[in-house]
Image: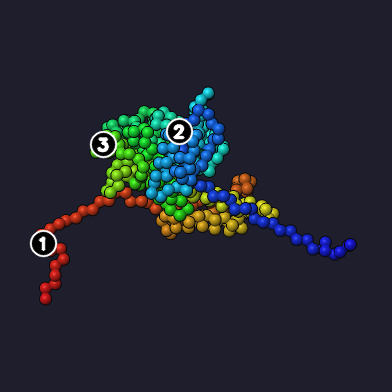
Amino acid sequence: MATHDSNISISITLDAAPAALFGFTPLHVAEVAAVTDRVRAFASAKEVDADATLSTATKDALKAHFAQLRRPGLVKLGFRATGGTPETWVEALTAIEQTDDDWYGFTCATRTDADIALISAWAETRTKLFLAQSSAADWLASGASPPAAYAAVAASERTAVIFHDTNTENADCAWLANRLVFNPDTFSAPWDAAIQGVAPYASNLTTGQRLSAMSKHCNLMLPYGPSPAFVDAGVNLAGRPLYELVSADWFKIRLESKIAQAKINASARGEKIPLGSQGVSILRPLVESQFAEGEAAGHFVPGQTSVEFIAPTAADIAAQRIRATGRAQLSVSARIFEFDFNFQRTAVNEEEVA
């Protein structure tokens, strides 16, 4: 039967589904004869123990993550094949990345400095953070140069080295999990910290060795007050506090996600993000809200952020490009404490004479 219902046409467009937030999850890369599955995930030490396919060394590394007072909710495990035609560490990491890229900080089951240098070069081209453990005596020796194997990556921003004289210990895994447990959406955690589940050095370090290692930007795990294992100073090979790098990476990753979501939603509605004031009115709140979240989490000093959108030039119009510049003052974590007191026999506060 004919009706006039066709006079009414209703079309509904939904915004794109919310993007899954990138997780600042730790990853450990272990060695196996043959890779059957490239990446696994574990939520507890109990799950690690239940996996009969893992070696004792791999289980120990994973359980070092879960030995911290604040345990991570998830730890990922990637594999490097050593049988047949062995994979290089870089080949394995690239294959892991292609399978599952939702992780941030990572450790590897190698204590060989030449391997660490190659992995460091790989990490430098990614938005990742590599924590390595080395037992090289040159870190402790007098002189300003790190071990020779690190010559090409001596100023790497995306690699941090922690010294331990026992290669079977997992100070790197414990340190990574201990810090990444603090979600950067809500905490800007410093990277000097007390860690658990790692045996002390087999040989005590001298003050000179401590100063030498730290001058080369090698992190040490030593007693500090009531803590028997405190990692100081929490820096990368370039000497930068790691929390600064995490803050920068967090801001970049989260802002990219917000802008991509805004573009997808506008396109789904058949709308543009126009060059000029209209586009700025859409994008400015995204940048300002990201700065506000950074201030609330302790990444930035409150009130010390700014963003400025640049008027589009002919080249910008040709490239369909919106540009902006911004600044933010990083919140600095105190690490060195100096106090000067004078104790004397005479009164400090003279009483008033009646």
Pointer 2 residue: 55
Q: Quadrant of the N terminus?
A: bottom right
Mark in the foreground, 1 or 3:
3
Mark sitting earlier along the chain (1/3): 3
Q: Amino acid at mark 1?
A: Thr
The one nearer the camera, 257 or 113, is 113
**What x and y, as percent, mark residue 103?**
50, 43
The residue at the point 12 percent across, 63 percent down is: 347
Spatial separation of the CA atoms under disc 1 and disc 2: 68 Å
Q: CA distance from mark 2 to mark 3?
A: 30 Å
Residue carrying label 3? 204
Label 1 with label 2: CB-CB less than 8 Å: no
> Closer to the observer: label 1 or label 2?
2
Q: Can residue 145 be seen at all in this image of the molecule?
A: no
User: Is 62 displayed left or right of 271 in the figure?
Assistant: left
Give the foreground label among 2 and 3. Answer: 2
Residue 317: percent from left, percent from top: 62, 48
**Extreme-right residue of the structure:** 1
Q: Amino acid at mark 3?
A: Asn
Disc 1, SS = loop
Q: Is residue 55 above or below residue 177?
A: above
> Mark 2 belongs to which amino acid?
Ser
